[in-house]
Amino acid sequence: MVRLPGRTGTRPTRRSSGRRPRPAPGPARRARERAERRGPAPGGETGLRAASRGRSVAGQVFVLQVVILLVLVVAAVVALVLQVRRDSAQNARDRSLAAAETFANAPGVREALAAPDPTAVLQPRVEAARREAHIDFIVVMNTEGIRYTHPRPDRIGKKSVGDIGPALAGRAVVEEVDGTIGRLVQAVVPVEAPDGKVVGLVSAGITTRNAGGLADRQLPVVLGAAAVGLALATAGTALVSRRLLRQTHGLGPGEMTRMYEHHNAVLHSVREGVIIVGADGELLLANDEAHRLLGLPGDAEQRHVRDLGLDPGTTGLLASGRIATDEVHLVGDRLLAVNQRPTDLDGGPSGSVATLRDSTELRALSGRAEEAREHLGLLYDAGVGVGTTLDVTRTAEELVGVAVPRFADFAAVDLYDAVLAGEDPEPGAALQRTAFGGIREDAPLYPVGEQIRFVLSSPQAYGLRVRRPVLEPRLEAAPGWRAQDFERSVQVLEHGIHSLITVPVRVGDLVLGLVSFWRSREEEPFDAGELALAEELVARAAVSIDNARRYTREHGLVVALQRSLLPRGLPEQQALDIAYRYLPAQAGVGGDWFDVLPLSGARVALVVGDVVGHGLHAAATMGRLRTAVSNFSALDLPPEELLGLLDELVVRIDQGERADSAGVPVTGATCLYAIYDPVSRRCAVARAGHPPPAVIAPDGGVTFPDVPAGPPLGLGGLPFETAVLELAEGSRLVLYTDGLVEDRERDIDTGLEELRTALASAGESPEETCRAVLDVRQPFRPGDDIALLVARTRALGPERVAEWEVPGDPAAVGDVRAAVSRRLDRWGLQELTFTTELILSELVTNAIRYGAGPIRVRVLRDRALICEVFDSGSTSPHLRHAADTDEGGRGLFLVAQMTGRWGTRYTPTGKVIWAEQPLPLPAPDGDRAG
C-alpha cells in the first residue's frame, strides 16, 4: 500500500463492516517498523531536538521554515510602518482640505471679510472650528495673503507662507511648507463671492509632527504583534515539523528518495488506471493510465472528484469510497471495470484507492441492448400516441410526430384521396400528402396537400406494387428515385438528405398509402434493422389509420341520414316568422330534432325532441319519432294527446328492441309540442321530460313559462298536461334541446340563466336571436347536440276573419251564403264566391242535419281561404262514393274536389269541419287594366 505524505487522521466510516485480509507489508510499513525498533535517540533526545539538528527531513524543514518566518515578519513590520506613515500623511492632507473648504463656505465668512474689522469677527470662530476639527491652525487671509486670523495672535496682520496663486485663480491647493509653527501640511481654498470673484482665502493644516504621531504611537503595537506572530509561527512550525517527523517515521532523505523512485516507477509502468481519493473526495493521485481512461485534465489532482466532469455513476462511486469489485461504468466511449478499496487499513491514512480496467470489448453488446431498448420505447410511444382520435389526418400527423426526430429527420404520410373520404382505396390513383414533419421547415420535399403520382421506377411506386418496405441507403446512387422529379431531387441532395425508407400503409389486403422516412443529420444511412423497425412502426399506425377511415365513412353515413331526416326547409305559413339552428355534438351525430308543421285553421305546430345517445341508431330513432309526430299532427290532436300517442309508440319500439338482444332502447327520449293559433294568439304547449320554452315579450323581457313537465317518453301510462300561453303579437317563442343549457361543467339552472341573459340582449328578429344565443357558446364544441328553434308570432287581425252564428234552421243556409258573398267581395275574392258558397252550403247543412247547436261559421283569409263550421256534435262526416241510384252522399265528395284539403278537428266543446281553397294568383297589370 502506498502511504501519502501529509495525510493523517482517522478516516470517516464509509465502508461496510466485516473482516478484511491483512495487507502485505510495503516499504513504508517496513520503514516504520525499523524506526520503532531503533527506539528513542541516544542521550534521551526528544524527536523535536533531533529534528532541529537537521539530521532528518523534518529537521531540515524546521530550520528552513524558521528562517523564512523571521524574514517574513521583519518585512511585514517594515512594510506596515511605511504604510502607516503614508496613510498618516494622506489623512493630514484630506483633513486640512476638508477643514479649509468647510470654513470657506461657512455662512457669514464672506460678510466678515467685508467688515471693517475682520479679525474681531473671524478669530473666535476660527479658533472654535480649529479645536473642533482637531487640526493645528485655520488662517483667514485677504487676497494679498495678509492674515486676519492665526493661532498665535502676534502673527495676525503678517503675510502668509506658501503659494496662494492657484487659490487666487479659484482652485484649492494642498502643499507641505515650512510655516511659522514648523513643518506643516496646509490646504488653501478661495472664498468666492456670488459672482465667482475671489474675495479671500482660507488656509488650514496640520504640522508634520502631529501627523506622524499616529505612526509613532502604532509602532510599539506593530512590533509587539510581530513578536507574537513570530512566536506563534515558530511554535506552529515546530508542531508541523513534529507531525512530519512522526509521519516520515524518522526516515532520512535517502530513504525518502528511494521510496519515491519505487513508487513513481510502479505507477507509471502499470497498465491499469490507479486513482487515490482522500476522505473529503479530493483526488490525490491519478497515474497516466487513469488520466487516459477517464480523460482527466492535467490539473485534476487536488480537485474534488465531482469537479472533474465524470459521469454521475463514476463520480458517485469515487466520492463514496465504498468497496466495489468489477463494477462496470460507461465513461465516454469506454466501458471501465472499477475496483475500489479503502486505504485506512491497519492505521493507514483515510481515503480510497481505485483501479480501472478498460473493458470496451463489452461495448458492442451494450450498444445493441441500448438500441433495442430505444426501438421498443419508440414502438411503445407509437402505440400510445398514434390513434388518439378517429380523424385520418390527425392520426397521420401523430405518426410523423412520433417518428421525427427519434427515428428519422423527415417523415411524410401519403394517402389515397378515397381513404381521406372514408372509402376503400383505389389502386393506381394519385396520393395526397396528408402529413409532413422534419427537423427543419425548409426541406425541398412535397408539401402537405400535394397530389403525387410516383413514377414506376421510384422506390415508392415499387413498394406500393410489391406491398413491402423499400430501403434506398444512398439516394445519390438511386436513379429510380431521381426520375420522380430530377430538379427537386437535386435540391433534396443539396439539403443533406441522403437516405430513404418507404413503407406501404397496409391493413389486410388494402394498401391505404405509404410512409416515407428520410435521414440527413447522421452520416450513416438507414440499415436493415431500421427498415424492420420502420415496417413495425407503420404497421401499428396503419391499424389506427384504418379505424379512422372506417369511422369517417360511418360518420358520413350517419350525417347524411340525419340531414335527410331533419327538415330541409320551412313549410309555407304566415302565423310565425321562424329561424333555426342545429349544431352536431363533438362526439358525432346525435338524436336532436325539430319540425314545423302547418295545421288547419292557419295554426302552426312547433316540435323539438331529443333522443338519448349518438350515432346511427340515435339518428334512425330520431327519424322514426319525427315521422310519427308529423303523422299524428295530421289528426289535429291537442298537444297532450299527441304526446300520449308518441309515448305509446316509444313503448312499443322498446318492446321490439328488447326482443332483439342487439337492440338499443329508446326510453328517455324527450319532446316538446306546441300549437300556435294566430287568430286567438294562444299557444298550447306540452312537454315530455324536455326543458321548458322561453318567451321573449315585444319589450324584450324574457320568461320561462310554467309548463308542466311530463315524464320522458317510453315510461308508459303517465298523463301529460297542456299549458295555454297568450302571446302578444311580435313575441318570440324559443324552443331548444338540453345540449344548449347543460353539460358536464354546469347544471341546467346555470344554463337557463345564461340563456336568459343571451335572449335579453338579442335582436328582434329570429335570426338575430339564434345568432346571439349561439355566439355565447362559441368557440365551445358541445358534448351533446343542440337544436334551437325561434318563432316570432304574427296575428290574424279582425279584418281577415269573419264569423257568423247560424240558427239550427236549414233556411239559414241562404243567409250564410249571402254574408259570405259580401265578405269575399270586400276581400276582392269574387272568383271564389261560387265554390265557397257551395262548400259552406254543404258543411252547414251537414251540421244542421247531423250535428248539434250552437253552430258557427268562420272564414279566414290567410295564405289560403279557410272555411270552418263549428258545432257541438262529436260525429265526423266521412267521404264515400255514392252509387248512381243514391239520392245523397255526394256533398263531401264535391267539397273534396273543389278544395285543396279538408278535414275535421275536435275541440273541447265539439268539432270543426274545415276546408281550404288556394287564393287566386294576382292578375298581371295589363289584365287588370283591361
Image: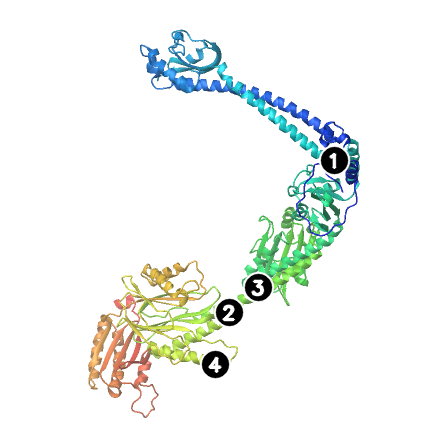
Q: Nearer the viewer, residue 814 or 691?
A: 691
Relative to 694, is 885 above or below? below
Judged by depth in the image, the label closer to the viewer, 3 or 4, is 4
Q: Disc 3 and disc 1: Cα gap in Å? A: 87 Å
Residue at the farthest front position = 43
Q: Which residue bears the numbered disc 2?
A: 557
Task: Name the N-terminal-most of marks 2 and 1.
Answer: 1
The amino acid beneath tag 3 is Val
Q: Disc 2, disc 4: CB below 8 Å?
A: no
- Density class for disc 3 (Cα within 10 Å; few <14, some 14-19, many ≥20) is many
Name the residue type under label 4: Gly
> Within 10 angstroms of label 1, few (less than 14), some, or many (20 or more) residues?
many
Question: Residue 900: x, y in percent?
Answer: 33, 77
Single out the mark in the foreground, 3 or 1.
1
Q: Secondary structure at mark 3?
A: helix
Above or below residue 90? Residue 501 is below
Identify the disc placed on residue 656: 4
What amino acid type should be assigned to the residue bearing mark 1? Thr
Q: Kindly identify which residue carries mark 1.
A: 248
**Total labels drawn:** 4
Q: Secondary structure at mark 2?
A: helix
Q: From the top left corner, tell me how far across and down residue 913 is, in percent.
A: 29, 81
* Left or right of residue 858: residue 98: right
Which of the two labelled residues, at mark 3 and mark 4, occupies the earlier sequence position? 3
Marks 2/4: CA distance?
Answer: 24 Å
Q: Residue at x 67, y 38 (%)?
A: 302
The label nearer to you, 2 versus 1, is 1
Q: Residues within 10 Å of mark 4 (few under 14, many from 20)?
A: some
Q: Give the distance between the C-alpha atoms of the residues marked 3 and 2, in whole angstroms.
A: 15 Å
Which mark is first along the chain, 1 or 4?
1
